[in-house]
Image: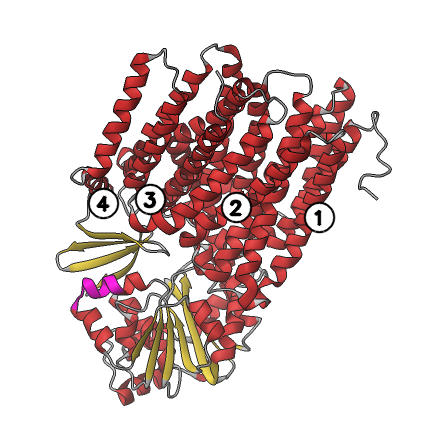
Amino acid sequence: MKFNKFIFLISVSVIGLSGIVAQVMLLRELLISLYGNELTIGIILANWIISEAIGAILIGKLIERIRDKINLFILLQLIFSLILPVAIYFCRIFKLFLAVPHGEGLGISTIFYTSFLIIFLPAFCHGGLFASLCKLSASGAGEKELSLGKIYSWETVGSIIGGILFTYIFARHFNSFQVATLIAIANFAVCLYFFNRDKVILKYATILAVVIMGCYLYSGGIINRLHWFSLRQQWKKYNLVDYRNSVYGNIAVTKENGQNTFFYNGLPIITTPYPDITFTQEFGNLALLFHENPKDILIIGAGAGGLINEAIKHPLNKIDYAELDHLLIRMLKEHPSSLTASEFSDKRLRVIPLDGRFFVRTTRNKYDAIIIGISHPSELSTNRFFTKEFFSLLKEIINPKGIIAFWLPGSSTYLSRELKDLNGSIINAVKAVYPYLRVISGDYNIVMASIDSAIDNTNAALISKRLIERGIKADILTPGYLDYRLSGERISWFKRAMQDATKKINQDLAPFAVFEMLLIWSKQFSNRFVDILIFLKSLQFKHILIVVLMIHMVLLLIFLLRRSSLRLGVSYAVLSTGFYGMSANLILIFSFQVFYGCLYYNLGIMMSIFMAGIAFGSIYITRRVGKIKDPVRSLVRVEIFTLVSAAILAFILSGVAFLRSSAYLIFIFLFFIAGLPVGLEFPLAGKIYLRGKENAGEVSGLLYFVDLLGGWLAGILTSIALIPLIGIFNTCMSLALLKVSSLSMLLQTSAKKRDWSIVLPP
């Protein structure tokens, strides 16, 4: 059956568009349900990739063996379209099957298998569609060698369009079920184009499905009712009164017995009008009471619902409150309480709807006290407020006698190894910037730092005196309680407990504290995974070198024993480039989050730019592949380019924080460049594999599987181990090392057939 080439390629783009939209949409839904940090993104993406890989290789083999190839393709389309809304539904309600209440976290192992089960079918079908399209193109358009490159290119173009549409239209104006319905209609239209006219029953079934899905979207809010039904199931034990997505995250509001709780990306952050009185009175007042006369203060995040209420008790002139998500402020005002009404009505309060880090970097104001209300660094978006780099930024806007204050998890009786290292890495970051440090230890540790020695000399008696002088009512801060909290015995106990804590410094691009929080989290929810994390904790760059050398030696031994063909070297090159592509993508995603803190909004567009790099590379090489006489030599050049790109990425990201205003453009450039080698390599590998062969579907499935297998390994290892433990610079250099190995293997497996004295053209 012959196809109109233009319509065929448009259909391919629809497949790519559907894949990226489904991937990002399910990723966002799972992050809310799993309460996962950015490292969880790597696990979810890895599961999507390996599921696609399984689909590609199995369907690639199957389509070579069956006669009715078009109907297999249509069946995959239908399953993908119908299973996507089911997957969204299970993203929201799967905890009911695990008997885990909403609000309780899950361990890494549970996150791994639940996300895999939920996204397997959509991703499997999407991977199978790629192999099917390659075979249909080869048989229907009469193109064999070019089919892999063209399909790869046009699918990637669709992914770019999908990422842009999702970021700027779908995510803003539609809920997930409405988006899934739009995707289903687009895919059903593709089914109709490919439909074999002899199959009358299937034809009318497809048309009926399109009509039904259209009715779902446009009739009486059925999709919207399904959306709210799934939310009520998800929040079954809560009285959900509001649920919205902003460009920065998801906000849900529950109400019970007059108490409003605001959840941000699934985690409770504000409870009003009755917050944790002990915490808010202690943390909200002590930083101000340690200062002799605070007038201007800055609260960064989580100030509403308690901390601001304590601050307005003091004789201050100005309270600046930086909160990234303006929707959170609006929803606090739409669901008011006596507490928040009192806070927002105070004339000294100025709400700044900006990322706290961006505000600190750009403001010219100076402050007597800076209170970081954001919770502990369980994710990169919060870790960026507990790093050496951020503490250095705060030093620029603090007055000479000013104080910065934040809190960390602690214990009144025993500090575990993980708590020691978590506190230690952040305290080390503070000590690298400020000469004076004071820690008030307990179930939560209040950390205060200054460039003035006054905090070292402040005692319980002075605090009690200032409470009386300022007329502050704080029931918990009695003289006896202050004597206990600030006693010399507790100071000595904490110092002894921390003697063997880590010497590492928590940094923007080496977020060691995030790994420690992951370890603490796993001990609480996933004991089976703890031993693996403890083993990985000692990971260093030299260990990466040893592992890569071992892999290389094993592959070299296989080559020598079996006298394998060039395919071994090509397969390893594709595998390592898949690893590089996913790792580089994750590195840039995490770095962007560190620098801007708005990944939730930009995830789709940044992934689209990465896909644009892949598309440009694949389109460029596909147009030239027919003229390339020696594709292996060209593949070697791409390997060298990938190696150099990994090394350059390390050095650019190390200095991007200092480039300030131009950093956003630099990230766009880096996302594009990171995808370029992936696009260049796949068509070349396809040309080498397909030389003299007819089985385009099987070959495309195999190469796609190898490519995605590398991405799966990267999603697991890079997100959980490499980035938090050896840092982004060393992770990039590890990628360069891996490409040195694959380049060497490619040269060795083809050494008998060509002269490599000149790899690059003169």
Residue 61 screen position, x and y as percent: 53, 17
Q: Secondary structure at mark 4?
A: loop
Q: Is there CB contact under 8 Å for labels 4 and 2?
A: no
* Residue wearing tag 3: 33
User: In the image, what residue type sits under mark 3?
Assistant: Ser
Separation of marks 4 and 3 at Cα, in angstroms:
10 Å
Q: Residues within 10 Å of mark 1 (few under 14, many from 20)?
A: some
Q: Where, by quadrant of the figure, is residue 737 drawn?
A: top right
Residue 610 screen position, x and y as percent: 54, 46
Q: Secondary structure at mark 1?
A: helix
- Residue 727 painted magenta: no
Q: Where, by quadrant of the figure, is residue 643 drawn?
A: top right
Residue 177 screen position, x and y as percent: 28, 39
* Residue wearing tag 2: 719
Separation of marks 4 and 2 at Cα, in angstroms:
29 Å
Of the numbered discs 3 and 2, the one sitting upstream in the chain is 3
587 w.r.t. 426: above or below: above
Q: Nearer the viewer, residue 609 or 620?
A: 620
Q: Which residue: 52% across, 35% down?
A: 154
Image mark for residue 235: 4
User: In the image, what residue type sits under mark 4?
Assistant: Trp
Disc 2 vs disc 1: which is toward the camera?
Answer: 1
Separation of marks 2 and 1 at Cα, in angstroms:
22 Å
User: In the image, what residue type sits under mark 2?
Assistant: Ser
Q: Which residue: 54% across, 30% down?
A: 151
* Residue wearing tag 1: 644
Residue 696 screen position, x and y as percent: 58, 20
Residues drawn in magenta: 330-337
